[in-house]
Amino acid sequence: MSKESVLPQPLIVLREALQPISRKLRTRLDKPPRQQQRVLDIVEFSSHHLDMIADNVNALADEVNSGLGKVISDADAPDADVYRAVARMEVHLDGLLGGYDEVRQASCSVTDRKVWSLLWETYRALLSKVQDFIDELTGCLDDPVTALEKRGLPTEGEVVLPIAFRLRAPPQFDELNRCIGHKTSELEAANEAEIRGQAKAEAATGSGSTLLVSLLAAFGLGWFFGGDE
């Protein structure tokens, strides 16, 4: 007896829509930056990017949960609705990729190099998690029987497989905040635009507090399984 899975049409469309996004993400993660741009103020630069990361990651989780999850849970959803939901998710992924590229293209002084490196690693860690999620999702759609068996779920009848999209602040994030605080203190100690330095310190601290302590978006993938002699 072999198992035959029947994917609802929205899930078939989802698999097709995610494939080019997965390829783009994998390519962009390792593609060398084309140009160098000098960064004179690493505190301002980093604070700006931490705000960008927080905004895009929160929006991305919302789109996966309330947008994509809602559409694919409707077996009668039109193909266009699935593509639109994926496109909305891709907008915020592109925001993260754009920030990642900008950081990699940045050139800074030797004393600012550690902050730059931690910011780059933070972007890459988050994007790698997104890549893992997409790989898991497409893997489930390509081979639902194996995905269900790995999770100890039934492979007969109508089955829903819960999928969770989790993003947490990577380990580099806390150290990045500490380094930004240290750089800000150095600016103040040297009396270089003390008021501006205090404002940047507040901005950096604010970004740290809003970034992803824990985000969870979850939805279910549904199949119908029949037996073949």
Image (spheres, rainbow, N blue to C red):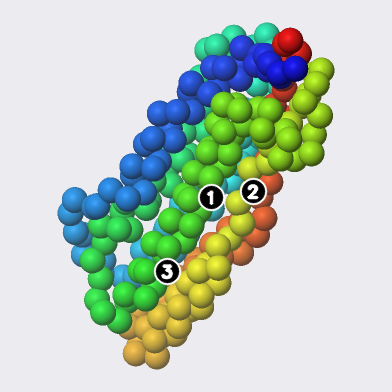
Residue 38 sits in which quadrant?
bottom left
Which residue carries the number 3 mark? Answer: 118
Residue 38 is tagged as none
Which residue carries the number 2 mark? Answer: 166
Specify the amino acid type for callout 3: Leu
Which residue carries the number 1 mark? Answer: 129
Q: CA distance from mark 1 to mark 3?
A: 17 Å
Quick check: 163 left or right of 57?
right
Residue furthest to the left = 35
Asked whether the residues under the numbered discs 2 and 1 touch, taking CB atoms below 8 Å apart as contact, a structural biologist would say yes
Q: CA distance from mark 2 to mark 3?
A: 21 Å
Residue 222, horizontal then vertical, whole percent:
72, 22
Q: Name the residue nearer the viewer: 135 or 165.
A: 135
Q: Name the residue nearer the viewer: 58 or 157.
A: 157
Q: Name the residue nearer the viewer: 163 or 106.
A: 163
Name which residue lies at 54% across and 17% down.
Answer: 13
Q: Quadrant of the C terminus?
A: top right
